[in-house]
Image (tube, coloured by chain):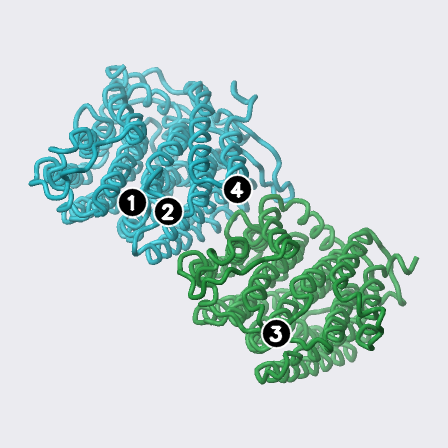
Amino acid sequence: MIPRLLAPEIGMAALALVFFLQGLGFESLKRLGGLSVWLAAAVTVLAAASLDARGSLFWDCYAVDSLSQFFKLAIAFGFAVVTAIGPRPVDVEEGKRPDYFMLLAISSLGLMLLASAKELTTMYLALELASLSLYAVAPLRAESRPAAEAAVKYILYGAMVTALSLYGLSLIMASQHTTYLPQLAAKPWSVAQSPLAVLGLALYLCGFLFKLALFPFHFWCPDVYQGVGNETAAFVSTLPKLGAVAVLVRLVGELGMNSQTGSALAVLAALSMTAGNLSALAQKDLKRLLGFSSVSHAGYAVMGLVAAGPEGLASAAFYGVCYLLMNLAAFFVVCRIGADGSNPTLASLDGLYKRSPGLAFVLLAAAFSLVGLPPTAGFVGKFFLLGSLWGKGHDWLVVVAVLNTAIAIYYYLNMVRHAYTVEPGEATPLALKSLRGILGGGLAVALLLVGLLPGFLFGLAQAAAGFAIR
Amino acid sequence: MTAHSGFPFLTSLMVLPVAAILVLLILRRDSAVRSVTLAVGVLEVLLSIPLYSFAPSLPGFQFVELKPWVPQWGMNYYLGLDGLSLFMVLLSTLLLPLCVLCSWTYIKARVKEFHICLLVMTAACVGVFSALDLVLFYVFWEAMLVPMFLLIAVWGGPERRYASLKFFLYTLAGSTLLLVAIIAFRAMGGSFAIPELLGRDFPVAFQRWTFLAMALAFAIKVPMFPFHTWLPAAHVQAPSAGSVILAAVLLKMGTYGFMRFCLGLTPEASHFFAPLMIALSVASILYGGLTALGQTDLKRMVAYSSVGHMGFVTLGIFMFNMQGLSGALLQMLNHGITTGALFMMLGAAYERSHSREMADHLGMGKYLPAFMGMWGLFALSSLAFPGTNSFVGELLVLTGAFSANLWAAFLSVPGAMLAAAYMLRATRSMAWGSPTTAKGWADLNVREWTALTPLAVLVLYIGFAPGLALKAVEPSLERLLVGVNKHAGTATLTTGPVAVSSSATLSGKPGTVTAKTGSQVNETPTTRLAEVAR
């Protein structure tokens, strides 16, 4: 029974073990190098197969429900795509590649555990597992000072919010005498009745808002994206955010959203969107631009949490997956253009259409999805978020969100403009190998398909959120 | 629901171009791409022939298709036509083969992608005018931006980057608040279905802000002064086919939005904001005309003339009477035909002269008589010469304005005169100026004749027999008018000199909007005009 319930986690742990053994130098496993993508895909299949697994483990600390399985599938899928985008990242030395993938797999495992955690300490441990492996991955860019700097920033910021989270946890424990979500849900959560617990929860949430890169916990985000390798940035920008959304959906679902917390999060969401978009306007470095864009997207995702309720949480979960798809598509392009390990800039996109029409199309789909233009996943994702929040007392946030879309158009469109209308500086064609072409094309098609027929995925998100709501 | 609910005509009009894209992707030769797209265009026109079986007398929407889309959010794939949308769909399908023809030799680079953009545009145009679900409408509305952006940005003139960016930023920024209004309509009305929402009485305060949110999007698209600044740049830089689609269809989305959504969903707010809209319409007419008069760039002149002509359309809409509304709807069609044709002709002239300047086209009449004859016809139509289509439309709008708002009418009349001034000035120079470079240019070839003739026929046909078009749209407009005027304290509708008593029953169920109109309706000047024309 337990292996079935933990199938995705076991699969991911086994994958990490394979990479570990590969790193130790087992000759027979070295030949597996090219197979890592397929192994990661196999874990995704495993996660899909256990989508309907239900149960409770480890003295109710660990829930296997539709919410956890939904996010585990998304995380496994994301990991597989990141592996496929860069199976041999040039930034990472040959000998360190097994360790690199092992750390990413461990981080993904941590995120999977996070999606299932139903107890605050378990959540904290899962978050740390996911984070610590990423801190180790960040400076792997060979002999790069910016990478080292990014890693230091990542670790320092991370350590600070971890401390805050831990402190918050202690306050919650002190005032509510339990760390189990179902029991916490039965306790009072108003400032008047249990101020210490509310303060504790606010501090505890900082850890997850940091992972989500919500304003004002976002300062690490653009620096880290810019500093780390392109493939690493593809991972850092997507999967940890998905884990954070999973936890926040569960927390809001179990504990509910009171008006004070809702208002505070709404203000943070508005600031996050605006600060992210305005800062992105001035960026030339693509990864930095996408970093600031992800700050604004964190604001959008939080709208679903502010809305709370089945619609709001389902929308947040749905948007998490849309964000995963569109950011992976964008980073697919970044990784291909910066295949030599360099950081691509807007100018690197010049004439992309001529150099690689396929890649330009992926960029077009990703950029328009990030803007939220129909018929892409980004549009329906945003639409559901806006629709779920309307009439919940924060209509102003809906207006702020659409106005921010108007700001965001400029820099996303600029990417497309560079790719399609500017003559290339260097006319060397960017060849896409057939399998890689299928991956990029698949991501672009997925963005369009989710945009045109969102019913199925939203149904899954709805089931996931429904399970989170008591 | 209606007599036409069997075969999905509207869906097939959208599926055909999209399916053609898949065929285009595997083609290698440019000539094959052009031929296949042209064939698809002809097929598209043939496929839209059944739409002529539209029965004006039937209440509600026709050719209705209703399928669940995202059931969790009550979003449906809901399509249908009424008098407001019928001709816009027909115009959209007619333009595809004409655009392919007028780009045949003009577009030499990235031919496949160009035609893919044309096909996407056509599918989206049909979608915009036939969508009966608010979200579906928004999806098509925004989906048109990408191919249009690419048409301007990739195949446009020297300033294409600036023009395409401005076009995209303006139109998308404008329509963001439309999305908020759509969400609010669902929250307040419980549905995204337009026929269902048309029967709701929304609170006045709600109507007012939703009107403004929607009107901004529509005013930018029309474009109304002072939201027009994207238009000249986009028109001038776009390739001929882009300009044609932009003028003929894209601008109409704005006026269609005003009619369908502002008047239909927020009638009281429409009355409240009518003075503002009328003032902007008059300003557009005068500004468009005056600016066009000052242009030496022919394409820019026609672009500014569009601002003026579309001003007449919005003026007619906010007169809240039959003449105004039917004139506005007819003008939408007319402007699409006439300005579309003018842009095609300018594209043909550009292929010969490689210039858009009036001075480089002097004396064309001597060497290109057929070209000048055709230009003369469309120029006369543009300045609303009697016997041409625009005359009927503009006359109706002005008649409506004179009976509803004397000042607005009085101020708009100079607009019509300005149109005569700039159009005749351009035509005189082109026809009778001292020839400079025109010597040696070839006259219209078969391809150009083929592209222009259908539009020329329409100019004259509507000009001499507007009755058929008016007959098809009147019942829908009457129902719209009943809805928009029922809250304005008018139990009886005043449609100009003759009073028409109308009673309407608006039920909340989709497709059941019905209206009973008094027998005196046959006595309205509009229908009398239609009768005479018949």
- The answer to the question of whether label 2 and label 1 lie on touching residues, with beta carbons closer than 8 A, is yes
Gap between marks 3 and 4 measured at Cα: 35 Å
Earlier-in-chain disc, 2 versus 4: 4
Q: Chain of mark 4?
A: B
Q: Secondary structure at mark 1?
A: helix
Tell me the residue that label 1 is attached to: B277
Q: Amino acid at mark 3?
A: Gly
Earlier-in-chain disc, 1 versus 4: 4
Q: Is residue A427 visible?
A: yes
Going 31% across and 27% down the picture, which residue do you hit?
Answer: B450
The mark found on residue B25 in the picture is 4
Q: Secondary structure at mark 2?
A: helix
Tell me the residue that label 2 is attached to: B215
Q: Is residue B348 left or right of residue A246?
A: left
- The answer to the question of whether label 1 and label 3 lie on touching residues, with beta carbons closer than 8 A, is no
Q: Nearer the viewer, residue B102 or B339?
A: B102
Packing grade of label 1 (10 A; few <14, some 14-19, many >=20) is many
Tell me the residue that label 3 is attached to: A229
Gap between marks 1 and 4 measured at Cα: 45 Å
Going 38% across and 37% down the picture, which residue do you hit?
Answer: B256
